[in-house]
Structures are given as C-alpha cells and as structure tokens.
Image: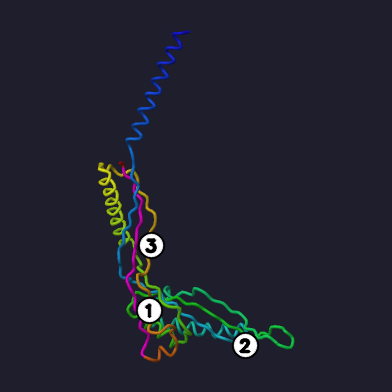
Amino acid sequence: MKKWKKIAAVLAAAMVLSLGMSSMAYAAAGEINVNGMGVVMADPDTAKISLTVETMGKTSEAAQKENNLILQKVTKAMQNMGVTKENIVTTYTSVYPQYNYNDETGKRVITGYQSYTDLQVTTKDIDNAGKYIDAALKAGATGTNGVDFSVADQSQYYGQALQIAVKNAGKSAQSIADAYGRQLGEVVSVTENSRNAYYTESVSMNKMMATEDSAAAGGTTISYGKIQITANISVTYNF
C-alpha cells in the first residue's frame, strides 16, 4: 500500500512538472494581430446617366402611350450618339392616378394619370456626359437624376490596394515588435476584410437640375473626381 502511494506521488509530481512546462511554453509563444489598409486612386472610365420621362393623360393608357413615344425618341437619340441598345435600360416605371379632393363630398376625385419612367444610359464617353443629357432632353426627356461615374474593371486597382494593405500591415506589426524589443515571426493567417470603391469628390453639374432650358442654353457641363479603391486585411504574426 505504501509502495502504491509512493508511485502515485511520483506520477502526480511528474504531471505538475509537465503542466508547468506546458504553461511556460505557451506563455513564451505569442501572436500579433494587426490590420492593414491599402488605397489606390483611379480615374473613372464609365458614366451611368439617369434620365426621367414623366407624362400626364386623362386615362392611364393615354399617359403610358405618351410616355412610350417619348422613350422611343430618347432611345433613338442615344443610339444616334453611339450608345448601344444594351446600354439603354429601363430601371423603373409606374402609372398612377392624380387626385383632387371634393370639398362638398369630402371624397377624392381622379383628375388624370401620371406615367413615370427612369432610364439608365451607360457610356464610356465620360467627358461628354453632359451632351448625352442635353440630347435626351431635346428628344423629350423631362429631367435627370444625375450621373454615376465608376471604374468598369476594378480588379487591377484592387490588386494594387491589396499589396499596399499587406505592406502596411507588415509595418504595423514590425513597429509593435520593435517596441517590445522582440523578433517578428512568420505570418500565421491573413483575412481579407472588405473592399470599397467610392468618389473622393461629388459629381457636379452646371445646374442643380437639368431641364429643357439647360439644353437650349449653352449645354450641360459635368465634372468628376477620382475614385478611391480600398482594401482592408487582418494579419496574424508569430511573436
């Protein structure tokens, strides 16, 4: 019985020693987790022009028919400027009644119908986006909701932004290691967090709202800024 107790005590001591060594090894090892962001500025190469056509009629059919006729003219005008049919897309359309209230009866009375359509025109001719708006207004479009500039293929720029993000993450990790007076280890893991592309400047026009008058008077001029493409990553290093 005493011999068994002695063996158990030895085993227990070995387990404590083993656990202590394991704990020390874990404490000696460590990791650094850092984030890195890369930014690349790119010139836009695509313009998406939003046009509106709004018509009124005594019946819903009459309002829609008039709207369709104008859309055909606007589409033809865009095609005459070199825009392909595939790049002229209807993004929204609706027909709804217009009401007046009868003061005597307190009831709503339909006075007519309004047909409304949003048309999106995509072109690579970004420097002349204003000319497309003017041509559409001349053909019968009743307004515009502005122009959206973008980069059609962001892969090249995003790849550059990722490389910058990796370098920035490495610099941050090295600075932390230097501050602790320790050697920076190998990369353990890398996570791609997000990607973004957005304007650094807002698009501006020579008029707040383009109308038929702007097409008749000197034309619409549109300016644009560069697009900022960003990449964000998280990196874990041995430390």
What amino acid is labelled 3 in the image?
Answer: Asn
Q: Which residue is mark 3?
A: 196
Residue placed at 32% from the left, 78% from the top? 127
Residue at (37% x, 31% y) in the render: 23
Under mark 2, the amino acid is: Lys
Q: Earlier in the sequence, mark 1 or mark 3?
A: 3
- What is the span of residues highlighted in magenta in the rendered image? 218-237
Tag 3 secondary structure: strand
The one nearer the camera, 179 or 121, is 179
**Residue 236 versus residue 147 in the image, above or below:** above
Q: Residues within 10 Å of mark 3 (few under 14, many from 20)?
A: few
Q: Residue furthest right?
A: 105
Residue 148 falls in which quadrant of the image?
Answer: bottom left
Q: Main secondary structure of the magenta part?
A: strand
| Residue drawn at 30 percent across, 63 percent down | 40
The residue that mark 2 highlights is 58
Q: What's the amino acid at mark 1?
A: Ser
Residue 18 pos. (x, y %): 37, 25
Mark sitting earlier along the chain (1/2): 2
Indicate which label's residue lies in the foreground, 1 or 2: 1
- Disc 2 secondary structure class: loop
Q: Nearer the viewer, residue 9 or 65?
A: 9
Confirm or deny contact between disc 1 and disc 3 (CB under 8 A). no
Q: Counting other residues with Cα less than 10 Å from the Cα at mark 2, is it few (<14), some (14-19), or many (20 or more)? A: some
Q: Earlier in the sequence, mark 2 or mark 3?
A: 2
Residue marked by disc 1: 204
Q: CA distance from mark 1 to mark 2?
A: 37 Å
